[in-house]
Amino acid sequence: MSAEEAAWVPYRERPDWADVTPIPQEEGPNPVVAIGYSDEFVDVMDYFRGIVASGEKSQRAIDITHEVIARNGASCTGWHWRWLCLQSTDANLLKELEYCDHLSTRYTKNYQLWYHRRLIVESIGISVAQREIKYLDGLLVDDSKNYHMWSHRQWLVRTYGLWDEDLALVNSLIRIDLRNNSAWNERYFIMTRGGTDMAHLLAAAGNEREYTSTYIEKAPDNESAWTYARALPSDPAMGVSPIAVLVPLATNILEAHSHNVHALSLMAEAAVEQIAMAAHSKEQEQAALLAISYYKKLIEVDPMRVRYWAWCLQNIPQPSKAA
């Protein structure tokens, strides 16, 4: 038993809580499979319900929300009442952020905690943005696939324009693990400015394609990098599709890795595009033959998706006789 547990005094025995009427949990007259709460948990929750029922927003109300959260980190009511009390008591929000720092290592995937943290940062404002981004840097290095952290970070980056800081972390995470799909996803978020500025992505596409090609060459089976590369737009002035731009890369990959599914599927799609773009029937026929050969190869080397590749093979456009 810890010193804190040994020193625990039930609320019903605390003189300074004698004015609060505890409210037991309503279980109904004949509860089925009632949960066996500990006496300590029942005591805390009964007095917390009493505080909420009375509408009290005070320091002791904040204190009891800590007890509630310590026993049930997912308590929506506990977190909500804590926030209302913080607003009503003009509390020190920097200290509250430190409180969240402490709990973040315990409740790393707790939605309520991250929502509470956002409310605090939003209330403090831009002065705490750099502190917050650095704090997230440390957490994501250890837990780089945590959805809640990424969601909070995207809000932070978008709200305070921390695009460069975000890109620095993403570069680091990809160097550590080039298959980190969360980092590649965040890279697209950065380049599109959260999906609001596709012109920024277009301007960066050339450099991004070169960057991504390097990682594809290091790990040709890395689906995350291929997916990101496919999402990069091509310059409309070039008159070449985003798929066609990647043909040289796919060709190089296939020279060393003839069964690479990602390169084969890209080459097949490029051939299908060429059928539609070719000016003469002979060119269309040649492109169709290429597409057929690639899809047949995919059926051979990728049995997991054999039905899909067979469907693609059956739906190759027929060359136009009028062309």
Image (spheres, rainbow, N blue to C red):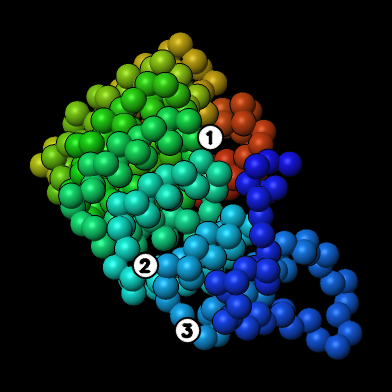
The crowding category of the residue bearing disc 1, from other C-alpha atoms within 10 Å (few below 14, some 14 to 19, many at least 20), is many
- Can residue 73 be seen? yes
Q: Residue furthest front?
A: 15
Report if the CB atoms under discs 1 and 3 are less than 8 Å apart. no
Mark in the foreground, 1 or 2: 2
Residue annotated with mark 2: 86
The image quadrant that residue 133 belongs to is top left
For the residues labelled 1 and 3, the Cα–Cα distance comes to 67 Å
Residue 282 visible (yes or no): no
Give whichever of discs 3 and 2 has the lower sequence position: 3
Crowding near the residue tagged with mark 3, few <14, some 14–19, many ≥20 C-alpha atoms within 10 Å: few
Instruction: Identify the amino acid type marked 3.
Output: Gly
For the point 30% across and 44% down, which residue is it?
Answer: 132
- Circle number at residue 55: 3
Helix, strand or loop under label 3: loop
Q: Which residue is mark 1?
A: 295
Q: Residue furthest bottom?
A: 29
- Which percent across, then down, holds residue 119? 34, 62
Residue at (39% x, 32% y) in the render: 138
Quarter of the image with the N terminus is top right
Left or right relative to 56: residue 69: right
Tell which tag, 1 or 3, sits nearer the viewer. 3
- The numbered mark, 1 or 2, whose residue comes first in the sequence reads 2
Task: Give the quarter of the image for residue 173.
Answer: top left
Task: Name the amino acid type tagged 1.
Answer: Tyr
Residue 202: where, in percent of width, then height? 17, 43
Residue nearer the viewer, 95 or 115 = 95
